[in-house]
């Protein structure tokens, strides 16, 4: 799921900021790799805390 999210966000932001030209694929790939290296560890560490907080907010047993 993290990879799909990073794919979509980096594609959209790179296209918006730089446009489509011959250099777009390389710029997007670099953005994707950096974004993936940041997002996946964040997901790994933050997802359990987010689940716990959501459970508390919804009154579900944790």
Image: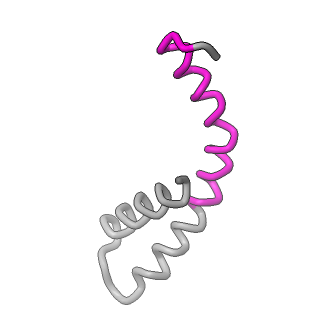
Residue 19 placed where, x, y %?
30, 74
Q: Say if the magenta span includes residue 48.
A: yes
* Residue drawn where x is 47% and y is 55% of the image: 5
- Relative image position of residue 13 (x, y in whole percent): 37, 61
* The C terminus sits in image quarter: top right
Q: Is residue 40 above or below residue 10?
A: above
Horizontal arrangement in the rendering, residue 51 relative to residue 20 (left or right): right
Magenta stretch, residue numbers: 35-60
Q: Position of residue 8 (x, y in %)?
A: 41, 61
- Please tell me which residue is depicted at 53% across the width and 67% down the height of the picture: 32
Location of residue 7 in the rendering, given as x and y in whole percent from the top left corner? 47, 64
Name the dominant secondary structure of the magenta segment: helix
Q: Is residue 22 left or right of residue 57?
A: left
Residue at 58% in and 29% down? 50
Compared across the picture, whether 44 is left or right of 2 comes to right
Q: Is residue 17 magenta?
A: no
- For the residue pair 53 and 9, the one nearer the viewer reads as 53
Q: How are the colours assigned in the image? A: one colour
The quadrant in which residue 30 appears is bottom right
| Residue 56 sits above or below residue 40 on the image | above
Residue 53 lies, with reference to residue 28, above or below; the image says above
Q: Nearer the viewer, residue 53 or 20?
A: 53
Q: Which quarter of the figure has residue 44?
A: top right
The single residue placed furthest to the front in the displayed view is 61
Of all residues, the one furthest to the top in this rendering is 59
Q: At 37% from the left edge and 89% from the top edge, which residue is drawn?
A: 22
Q: For the image shown, how many numbered marks are present on the structure?
A: 0
Q: Is residue 55 above or below residue 10?
A: above
């Amino acid at each position: 799921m993290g990879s799909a999210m990073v794919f979509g966000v980096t594609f959209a932001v790179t296209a918006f900021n730089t446009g489509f030209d011959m250099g777009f694929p390389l710029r997007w790939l670099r953005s994707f790799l950096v974004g993936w290296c940041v997002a996946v560890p964040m997901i790994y560490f933050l997802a359990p805390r987010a689940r716990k907080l959501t459970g508390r907010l919804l009154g579900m047993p944790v």
